[in-house]
Image (spheres, rainbow, N blue to C red):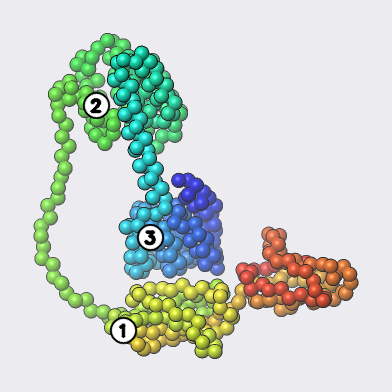
């Protein structure tokens, strides 16, 4: 399961979330969606907390892609602690995950079924060997089998079998070794302490050659206390001991609340919402967000449309929620001014404009000045391409390459020189400052 969760890199994932800046929002969203639907609760809680980085529409996409978010108390509690709560439509979308099984939940279910089937086989085989009165090697075979399984369950079975054989020393040695052998959870440690207490009573009776009917008052009280844990196997074992000794049957009552029926009044809710249609940011690099609210009376066949400067329709999005946000990624659109329109009920409700600028990169001024005698670069800053003009014509120049590196020294572009100049496409590079050599 650990390899599935956060692609096995929970620490790195959480760090990238916690150190993200507002301009990293869309790239972070893509990264988290790539890891979905196996994000850990820790990663999702961290995502909920960075309100300036992940707008509501981005956060809703990430959490909706991870159905576990709707079942996690940690995630739901983090959502209630936000300074700006998510609008109801986003919460509704996230909570749909309650009825959906994530990949981790499916794998966990399959693993649980496998463990259950294996546990049943182990118990069946153990019972068969314990009741075998014919084979002379049944005892050795059972001890060997349980020892080889190397699991918490079979170790407990072996402790019980040692006590059955009156082998108190081996039972106590094996039990003492369990807490060093396994990393117990809080619940497992609670059960371990109860089993240790019960085993101590059983060992004491065996050493004194006494039966359960000869327990002293303190031992009997301890057995009664253990028996209260009816959700644990050791609790059931203690109940069986008491039932045998005192003929006491244990009943655990269930309280059923009684609700009085109340008459509900159904009143029609009047929709007083006003039209909302906003785009942000107005100057978009890799995305912009459409924030809208359509009055109920107009919410028929609603659509969002986008047109370029030639009035050509480049995008149509059908709207199925009266109030929501749309995330429009702009990487595939040319730089320029676009008109966005909100249509519903066969009429245009509103229109706004957004400017899409291409990815803008800037070259390190210091390096450019150092190399100015060799080559000239323009434009700087650049959005779509760089034109490199070489000021020296020689065999070395003709056989050279132009190389662009980021601030970490990683090569992001490399291109051979041709005819004294090169044009390098840089529209696919993220915004930032680069070095050229």
Q: Residue at x 64, y 73 (%)?
A: 427
Q: Which mark is residue 423?
A: none
Neighbor class of circle 2 (other Cα within 10 Å; few <14, some 14-19, many 20+) is many
Residue 79: image tag: 3
Using the image, determine if residue 131 lies above or below residue 228. above
Residue 84 at what x, y percent from top left? Answer: 39, 66
Q: Spatial distance from mark 2 to mark 1, Cα to Cα?
A: 68 Å
Expressed as whole percent of the image width and height from the top left, the position of residue 426 reads 67, 72
Distance CA(mark 2)–CA(mark 3): 44 Å
- Quadrant that contains the C terminus: bottom right
- Tell me which corner region of the image, top left, top right, bottom left or bottom right, holds residue 179: top left
Q: Is residue 422 left or right of residue 37?
A: right
Secondary element type, mark 3: helix
Q: Is residue 62 depicted above or below 8 in this figure?
A: below
Which residue does the numbered mark 2 point to in the structure image?
A: 238
Residue at position x 38%, y 73% in the image: 324
For label 2, the SS is helix
The numbered mark at residue 298 is 1
- Give me the residue at 71% from left, 78% from top: 379
Report, in whole angstroms, how far the alpha carbon at label 3 lies from the one at label 1.
31 Å
- For disc 1, the neighbor class at 10 Å (few under 14, some 14 to 19, many from 20) is some
Residue 120 or 285: which is nearer the viewer?
120
On screen, residue 104 above or below 158: below
């Amino acid at each position: 399961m650990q390899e599935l969760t956060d692609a096995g890199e929970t620490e790195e994932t959480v760090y990238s979330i916690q150190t993200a800046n507002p301009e990293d929002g869309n790239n972070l969203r893509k990264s988290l969606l790539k890891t979905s639907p196996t994000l850990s609760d820790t990663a999702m809680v961290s995502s909920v907390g960075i309100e300036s980085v992940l707008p509501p529409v981005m956060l809703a996409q990430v959490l909706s892609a991870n159905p576990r978010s709707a079942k996690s108390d940690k995630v739901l509690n983090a959502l209630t602690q936000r300074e700006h709560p998510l609008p109801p439509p986003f919460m509704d979308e996230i909570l749909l995950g309650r009825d959906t099984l994530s990949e981790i939940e499916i794998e966990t279910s399959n693993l649980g079924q496998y463990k259950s089937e294996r546990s049943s086989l182990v118990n069946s085989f153990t019972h068969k060997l314990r009741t075998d009165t014919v084979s002379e090697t049944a005892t050795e075979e059972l001890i060997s089998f349980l020892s080889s399984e190397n699991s918490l369950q079979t170790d407990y079975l072996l402790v019980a079998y040692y006590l059955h054989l009156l082998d108190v020393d081996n039972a106590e040695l094996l039990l003492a070794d369990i807490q060093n052998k396994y990393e117990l959870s809080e619940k497992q440690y609670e059960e371990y302490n109860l089993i240790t207490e019960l085993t101590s009573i059983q060992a004491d009776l065996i050493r004194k050659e006494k039966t359960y009917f000869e327990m002293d008052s303190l031992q009997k009280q301890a057995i009664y206390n253990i028996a209260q844990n009816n959700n644990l196997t050791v609790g059931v074992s203690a109940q069986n001991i008491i039932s045998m000794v005192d003929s006491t049957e244990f009943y655990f009552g269930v309280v059923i609340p009684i609700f009085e029926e109340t008459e509900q009044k159904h009143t029609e809710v009047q929709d007083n919402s006003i039209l909302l249609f906003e785009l942000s940011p107005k100057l978009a690099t890799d995305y912009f967000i459409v924030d809208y609210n359509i009055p109920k009376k107009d919410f028929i066949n609603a659509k969002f449309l986008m047109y370029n400067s030639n009035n050509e329709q480049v995008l149509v999005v059908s709207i199925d929620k009266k109030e929501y946000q749309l995330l429009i990624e702009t990487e595939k659109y040319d730089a320029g001014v676009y008109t966005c329109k909100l249509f519903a009920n066969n009429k245009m409700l509103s229109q706004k404009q957004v400017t899409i600028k291409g990815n803008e990169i800037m070259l390190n001024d210091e390096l450019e000045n150092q190399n100015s005698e060799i080559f000239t670069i323009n434009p700087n800053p650049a959005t779509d391409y760089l034109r490199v003009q070489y000021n020296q014509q020689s065999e070395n120049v003709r056989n050279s390459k132009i190389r662009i590196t980021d601030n970490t020294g990683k090569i992001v572009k490399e291109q051979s020189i041709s005819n004294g100049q090169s044009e390098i496409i840089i529209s696919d590079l993220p915004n930032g400052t680069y070095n050229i050599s």
